[in-house]
Image (cartoon, helix red, strand yellow):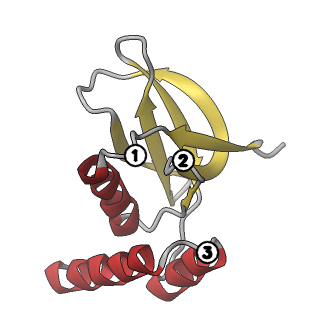
Amino acid sequence: MGLEASTIIIEIAKNDISRRMEIISQLHRNQIIYELDDMGNILIDGFGLEKRREKAEKDFFIKYELKDGNVVKWVYVKMEEPDIYYRIKALYCVSRRAYIDALKKRMLPPSYINLAKSTLRCEVVKG
């Protein structure tokens, strides 16, 4: 039996541009597919939304897990309760080209697509 498709929503105040860009940059570096809603919130599609207890100070982070020889990317978003996070098994792309195409299909603003390309170019140079 497969995991149920879910969406996690990261609510960000419209004027908190630096936080939004920090999170979006992390998503780009990890090639995790996202969308933006009309309010500017970040929507991350994936599978198996669940609550987890984690000792972390961050509002948002990504973890990797090796499972059955495959790397699984998990996205964590802090809830109101201390040390409780929503986590979702993220949808991601295995190639940079597929990732950019997936973002284009979600009709993100051109500035976000350009940021994705720039971020991925920087990651190649670092790697």
Q: Secondary structure at mark 1?
A: loop
Asked which quadrant contains residue 125, the reply is: bottom left
Side of 15 where 108 appears, left or right: right
Residue that label 2 marks: 39
Side of 11 where 38 appears, left or right: right
Residue that label 1 marks: 14
Q: What is the three-letter code of the residue carrying label 1?
A: Lys
Percent x, y of residue 71: 47, 58
Quarter of the image for the N terminus: give it.
Answer: top right
Residue that label 3 marks: 107
- Number of residues whose C-alpha sits closer than 10 Å to that of mark 3, classed few (under 14), some (14–19) or many (20 or more): few
- Specify the farthest residue to the front: 15
Mark closest to the chain's N terminus, 2 or 3: 2
Distance from Cα at disc 2 to Cα at disc 3? 15 Å
- Specify the farthest residue to the right: 1
Mark closest to the chain's N terminus, 2 or 1: 1
Q: Up-down: is 25 above or below 20?
A: below
Q: Up-down: is 7 above or below 27?
A: above
Q: What is the three-letter code of the residue carrying label 3?
A: Met
Closer mark to the observer between disc 3 and disc 1: 1
Percent x, y of residue 6: 70, 43
Side of 95 where 114 appears, left or right: left
Residue at 58% in and 84% down: 101
Residue at 67% in and 46% down: 47
Q: Residues at badges 2 and 1 in contact (C-beta under 8 Å)?
A: yes
Q: Secondary structure at mark 3?
A: loop
Percent x, y of residue 108: 54, 72
